Image (tube, helix red, strand yellow):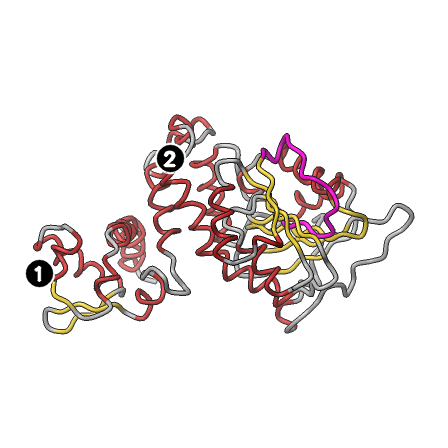
């Protein structure tokens, strides 16, 4: 690369925040719902309560981002915008975009977190009801895909009672129950979240097969009698010390022979990737203070200390990985080699992983 190419790369990187702000504004105004049919800026402006000239500028920005097309003076959604940014579509991502918008102010004060090691958002206290709903439904936007991938990769038919810890929008639980008709589920989450969780379970028409526990996962009981526990995308919000407590409590709540699935943005032991997970660690610094993304070795230490022994690893997506382990029976337990595999070889765990490296 020539010097001018390096300069262009740095300049493009420094302006990326502009792209996200354009997306945030359009999403918040539900602009894309009005662009399923071609329309002019003058036609759109009163529908979103914007100035006509400013509307034209924003629409041209969306054109630059590849989210709309333009023919003459009429704008129209691209397939990506139509699939992901129009409410009600199967791929809708508007809630997670809104959640990311809520977290953006903290990133503009990242230097404070770097100096203190604490979240700049801590001074704001708990999320407002609107922020909480955007967060929980944002998790629905993104988890519907990984939930389907899990049931495609793993044969969970032997299991009868799932504990979905931090179940939020109940996507994993309802997807598991749709696939396995003899399974029931218990969803554990904070008291402020459980009403949203119940709403999502009602929408899925799963009320008869789902129970709820409202509590603090660090201090309250998870209950007993589970042969399957899912801990999905939670450990990055907590410190290593708190994660040790959570994993130990999962071990105690799980029946002997039961399966524990820990899914998160796990990073390689040398912390060189995946890139998304490395950046997400900074998101946890700014947003939680104590959170981080964790290595395979760290997870192995927590599960081994809790009493789990064998394990397997599956790369579910480029950034999301699963750690699978079973609670041994009191007398003896069998190796997990070959257990639970389902689907194509590309979904099988890497065979050259050495967790203690």
* Magenta region, main secondary structure: loop
Residue at the far front in the pictured view = 208
Q: Identify the residue at horizontal 46%, vertical 56% (top origin).
A: 142
Q: Give the left or right position of residue 69, taking residue 337 as reference.
A: left
Helix, strand or loop at disc 2? loop
Relative to residue 186, is residue 122 depicted above or below?
A: above
Q: Give the left or right position of residue 332, taking residue 2 as reference.
A: right
Q: Would you say residue 226 sits in the magenta stretch?
A: yes
Residue at mark 2 to residue at mark 1: CA–CA distance:
34 Å
Question: In which quadrant of the rendered view does residue 35 lie?
Answer: bottom left
Helix, strand or loop at disc 1? helix
- The residue pinned by badge 2 equals 128
- The residue pinned by badge 1 equals 42
The 10 Å Cα crowd at callout 1, few under 14, some 14 to 19, many 20 or more, is some
Nearer-N-terminus badge (2/1)? 1
Residue 60: mark: none
Q: Would you say residue 71 sits in the magenta stretch?
A: no
Q: Give the left or right position of residue 280, taking residue 24 as reference.
A: right
Q: How many labels does the image show?
A: 2
x%, y% of residue 190? 53, 37
Residue at the far right in the pictured view = 331
Relative to residue 90, is residue 19 depicted above or below?
A: above
x%, y% of residue 90? 41, 65
Q: Identify the residue at horizontal 67%, vertical 49% (top origin).
A: 229
The residue segment tinted magenta is 215-230
For the residue pair 282 and 180, the one nearer the viewer reads as 180
């Amino acid at each position: 690369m020539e010097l001018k190419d390096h300069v262009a790369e740095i300049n493009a990187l420094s302006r990326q925040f502009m792209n996200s702000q354009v997306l945030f504004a359009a999403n918040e105004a539900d602009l894309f719902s009005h662009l399923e049919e071609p329309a002019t800026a003058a036609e759109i402006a009163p529908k979103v309560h914007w100035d006509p000239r400013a509307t034209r500028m924003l629409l041209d920005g969306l054109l630059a981002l590849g989210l709309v097309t333009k023919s003459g003076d009429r704008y129209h959604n691209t397939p990506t915008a139509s699939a992901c940014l129009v409410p009600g579509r199967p791929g809708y991502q508007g809630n997670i975009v809104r959640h990311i918008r809520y977290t953006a102010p903290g990133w503009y004060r990242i230097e404070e977190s770097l100096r203190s090691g604490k979240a700049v958002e801590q001074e704001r206290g708990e999320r407002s009801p609107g922020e909480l709903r955007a967060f929980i439904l944002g998790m629905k936007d993104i988890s519907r895909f990984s939930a389907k991938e899990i049931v495609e990769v793993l044969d969970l038919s032997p299991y009868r009672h799932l504990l979905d810890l931090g179940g939020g929008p109940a996507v994993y639980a309802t997807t598991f129950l749709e696939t396995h008709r003899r399974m029931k589920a218990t969803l554990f989450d904070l008291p402020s979240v459980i009403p949203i969780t119940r709403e999502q379970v009602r929408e899925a028409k799963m009320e008869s097969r789902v129970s709820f526990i409202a509590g603090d996962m660090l201090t309250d009981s998870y209950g007993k009698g589970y042969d399957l526990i899912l801990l999905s995308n939670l450990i990055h919000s907590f410190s290593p010390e708190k994660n040790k407590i959570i994993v130990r409590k999962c071990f105690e709540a799980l029946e002997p022979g039961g399966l524990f699935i820990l899914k998160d943005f796990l990073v390689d032991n040398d912390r060189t990737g995946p890139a998304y997970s490395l950046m997400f660690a900074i998101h946890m610094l700014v947003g939680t203070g104590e959170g981080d993304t964790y290595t395979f070795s760290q997870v192995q230490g927590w599960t081994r200390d809790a009493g789990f022994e064998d394990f397997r690893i599956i790369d579910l997506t480029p950034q999301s990985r699963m750690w699978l382990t079973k609670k041994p029976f009191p007398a003896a337990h069998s190796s997990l080699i070959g257990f639970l595999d389902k689907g194509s070889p590309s979904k099988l765990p890497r065979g050259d992983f050495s967790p203690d490296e």
